[in-house]
Image (cartoon, grey):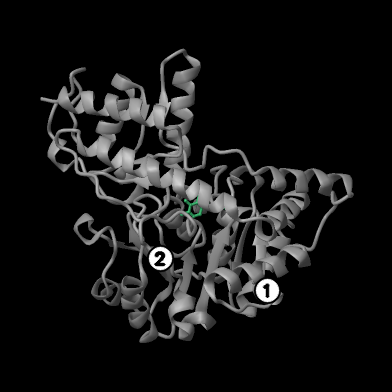
């Protein structure tokens, strides 16, 4: 009898975590490595949030809490949704988990039955399809082409919906492309969803605050109140407040769903870390100027990286609306051979040769469901990004 479950056999480990690990190993061997593969801000958590966590420890907030979040944090989350998204939720409609990741996982695990379909626009965050598979569902991938700004169209969504569709997962701005659905694009999709009352909407808004130029963030339940009763609006403090390690995410939606998610969490992790909950409370209730400071830094870096990559022969890098990723196309480089003798047969071969020959670690597009592309996370300093773009340009110039 095999040790491992059939469920686990259906999924693969996160490729982004694997590549980050490989880059770390090479760096430990003494190689000069620039890792642009990890999806986390390079800033420290703001001081007032760190202080709130220390105060929480000293105040004795070190015990189990309510499974899906302390009441103060749930209230602060309700205030956030009202203040920033015009969405009215009560604490009973809110759940707090160990990162946004657990919220998504809980929602899918609590609702999917074998055969249920989940529509996932590609390129997608690597975990969506595997979470759906773990929960026994079937991912239905809909490709957002580069020519459409990496957005899926209303017609594509309409065509993908079947009687078995349980959820559609929306992620704007997106990991890995940074593409955003502004009100017009989002409304195109919510109009379709209004015609299919059996489909639930999972909106992953984790990059809400990282938007650039004149892009205005919207979330489905906000622009189409008719969808609110079948929408889980998910968010978290990881990316907005540089709190990836604290592991706090949250979701808001109908009470029946929220209760089911809490039931699942009560039999797995129980409450998210008590101290982190107090830190998240300080993040949501405290001064918000950090949001604009970090947004402006990321916008500057985006401009730097887009210009640097578009200067690479054979590469096309669209300008993303948000997040901290770019997703250039390397269509014109496929079939070439690198200066080190590697055949660039696909985007995985490109990423491998790039790492081996220049020390720059990026994630290949196949991991996100759209090739031939790669993803760069530009959550690092301007100096490092300039160095990385130079190395990538020289690599491309050496391709024959
Ligand atoms: C699109 C997206 N959703 C959710 C998450 C999960 O974030 P966390 O679990 O740190 O809150 C990430 C993290 O990389 C992400 O990129």
Out of 135 and 275, give the one closest to the viewer.
275
**Mark 2 C-beta to ligand 1 under 8 Å:** no
Give the residue number, with chain letter if any, for mark 2.
216
Q: Quadrant of residue 309?
A: top left
The C terminus, quarter of image: top left
Residue 240 drawn at (x, y percent): 55, 52
Residue 42 drawn at (x, y percent): 52, 37
Q: Quadrant of residue 116?
A: bottom left
In the image, taking residue 112 as reference, residue 287 lies left or right, namely right
Out of 165 and 254, give the one closest to the viewer.
254
Residue 307 drawn at (x, y percent): 26, 39
Of tags 2 and 1, the one toward the viewer is 2
The N terminus, quarter of image: top right
Residue 353 seen by the camera = no
Outermost residue toward the top? 30
Residue at x 49%, y 57% (from the top left corner): 209
Residue at x 34%, y 25% (from the top left corner): 387
In the image, residue 369 sits, relative to residue 153, either above or below, namely: above
Give the residue number, with chain letter if any, for mark 1.
259
Outermost residue toward the left? 400
Residue 248 seen by the camera = yes
In the image, residue 338 sits, relative to residue 193, either above or below, namely: above
Residue at x 42%, y 40% (from the top left corner): 15
Q: Residues within 10 Å of mark 2 (few under 14, many from 20)?
A: some
Disc 1 is placed on an element classified as helix
Q: Quadrant of residue 237?
A: bottom right
In the image, taking residue 89 as reference, residue 142 lies left or right, namely left
Disc 2 is placed on an element classified as loop
In the image, taking residue 316 as reference, residue 35 lies left or right, namely right
In the image, residue 367 sits, relative to residue 123, either above or below, namely: above
Residue at x 38%, y 43% (from the top left corner): 300
């Amino acid at each position: 009898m095999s040790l491992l479950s059939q469920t686990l056999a259906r999924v693969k480990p996160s490729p982004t975590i694997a590549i980050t690990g490989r880059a770390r190993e090479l760096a430990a061997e003494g190689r000069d490595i620039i890792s642009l593969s990890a999806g986390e801000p390079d800033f420290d958590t703001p001081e007032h949030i760190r202080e709130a966590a220390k105060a929480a420890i000293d105040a004795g907030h070190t015990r189990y809490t309510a499974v899906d979040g302390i009441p103060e944090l749930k209230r602060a989350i309700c205030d956030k949704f009202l203040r920033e998204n015009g969405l009215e939720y009560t604490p009973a409609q809110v759940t707090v988990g160990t990162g946004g990741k657990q919220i998504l996982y809980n929602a899918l695990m609590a609702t999917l039955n074998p055969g249920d379909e989940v529509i996932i626009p590609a390129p997608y965050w690597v975990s969506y399809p595997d979470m759906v598979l773990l929960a026994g569902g079937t991912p239905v991938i809909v490709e957002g082409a580069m020519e459409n700004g990496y957005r899926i169209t209303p017609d594509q969504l309409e065509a993908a919906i079947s009687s078995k569709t349980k959820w559609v997962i929306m992620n704007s701005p997106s990991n890995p492309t940074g593409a955003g659905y502004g009100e017009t694009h989002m409304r195109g999709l919510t109009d379709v969803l209004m015609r299919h009352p059996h489909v639930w909407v999972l909106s992953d808004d984790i990059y809400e605050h990282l938007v650039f130029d004149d892009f205005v963030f919207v979330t489905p339940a906000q622009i189409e109140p008719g969808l609110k009763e079948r929408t889980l609006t998910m968010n978290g403090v990881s990316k907005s407040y540089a709190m990836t390690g604290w592991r706090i995410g949250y979701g808001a939606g109908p009470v029946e769903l929220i209760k089911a998610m809490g039931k699942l969490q009560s039999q797995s992790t129980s409450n998210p870390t008590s101290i982190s909950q107090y830190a998240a409370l300080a993040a949501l209730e405290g001064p918000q100027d950090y949001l604009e400071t970090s947004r402006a830094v990321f916008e500057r870096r985006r401009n730097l990286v887009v210009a640097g990559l578009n200067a690479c022969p054979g590469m096309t890098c669209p300008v993303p609306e948000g997040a901290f990723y770019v997703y250039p196309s390397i269509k014109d480089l496929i079939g070439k051979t690198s200066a080190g003798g590697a055949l660039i047969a696909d985007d995985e071969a490109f990423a491998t040769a790039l790492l081996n020959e220049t020390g720059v670690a990026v994630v290949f597009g196949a991991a996100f469901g759209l090739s031939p592309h790669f993803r760069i996370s530009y959550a690092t300093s301007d100096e490092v990004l300039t160095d990385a773009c130079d190395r990538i340009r020289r690599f491309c110039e050496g391709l024959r």
